[in-house]
Image (cartoon, rainbow, N blue to C red):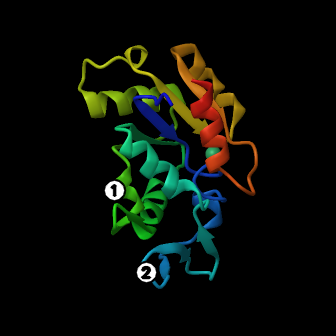
């Protein structure tokens, strides 16, 4: 199996099933499970949000193959997204860690995903690093972001908002490279 050097993930409808800036009102309370993981957070209106269930397994698999992980989100409320990434806690290599610790670079703002990925690569590998010199992919639910392919980044379409990024989709992608 071949792995990319960099895997970028959109957040809304790719990592979790909502628009975090319009659907959620902080602060969040954790709903802890028996092993200490927090797979669900409850916002101040009682709305429960969980990440798509396969996401931690996918991130852990990428990390175990030395793939750098970038979040690429155009949300106008990065502090809410950050709250979620810090609030969710998952088991990783036998420890319970905040989901945010599995990401190597967090990229935000009203920029194209090309710029998010480019800046993420510079953040991780240094200022001189060029997006075209790395094998990368983007998991994203909005097809307009397919334009990353112009820069050699493989676009992986997260089609189903019910299931988000699944292990099956991830395996299909890995088998295609
Ligand atoms: Mg999205």
Image check: 171 left or right of 62? Answer: right
The tag on residue 101 is 1
Mark 1 nearby-residue class (10 Å; few <14, some 14–19, many ≥20): few
Mark 2 nearby-residue class (10 Å; few <14, some 14–19, many ≥20): few
Q: Where is residue 111 in the image (x, y as percent from the top left)?
A: 51, 32
Q: Where is residue 62 in the image (x, y as percent from the top left)?
A: 43, 43
Q: Which residue is drawn at 29% across and 20% down?
A: 129
Q: Which residue is drawn at 23% across and 26% down?
A: 126
Q: Is mark 2 within 8 Å of ligand 1?
A: no
Image check: 20 left or right of 120? Answer: right
Q: Position of residue 142 (x, y in %)?
A: 69, 37
Q: Is mark 1 within 8 Å of ligand 1?
A: no
Q: In this view, does 83 lie above or below 137?
A: below
Q: Residue at x 66, y 59 (%)?
A: 17
Instruction: Report the image quarter containing ligand 1.
Output: top right
Image check: 57 left or right of 143? Answer: left
Residue 175 sits in which quadrant?
A: top right
Per the image, the residue denoted by label 2 is 35
Q: Which quadrant would the C terminus be assigned to in this image?
A: top right
């Amino acid at each position: 199996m071949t792995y990319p050097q960099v895997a970028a993930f959109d957040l809304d409808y790719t990592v979790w099933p909502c628009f975090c800036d319009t659907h959620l009102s902080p602060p969040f309370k954790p709903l802890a499970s028996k092993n200490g993981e927090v797979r669900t957070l409850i916002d101040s209106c009682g709305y429960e949000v969980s990440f798509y269930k396969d996401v931690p397994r996918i991130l852990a698999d990428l990390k175990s193959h030395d793939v750098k992980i970038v979040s690429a989100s155009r949300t106008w409320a990065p502090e809410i997204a950050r709250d979620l990434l810090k609030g969710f806690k998952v088991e990783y290599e036998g420890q319970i860690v905040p989901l945010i610790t599995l990401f190597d670079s967090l990229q935000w703002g009203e920029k194209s995903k090309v710029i998010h990925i480019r800046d993420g690569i510079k953040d991780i590998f240094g200022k001189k690093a060029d997006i075209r010199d790395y094998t990368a992919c983007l998991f994203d639910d909005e097809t307009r972001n397919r334009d990353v392919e112009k820069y050699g980044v493989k676009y992986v379409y997260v089609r189903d908002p019910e299931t988000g990024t699944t292990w099956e989709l991830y395996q299909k992608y890995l088998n295609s490279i």
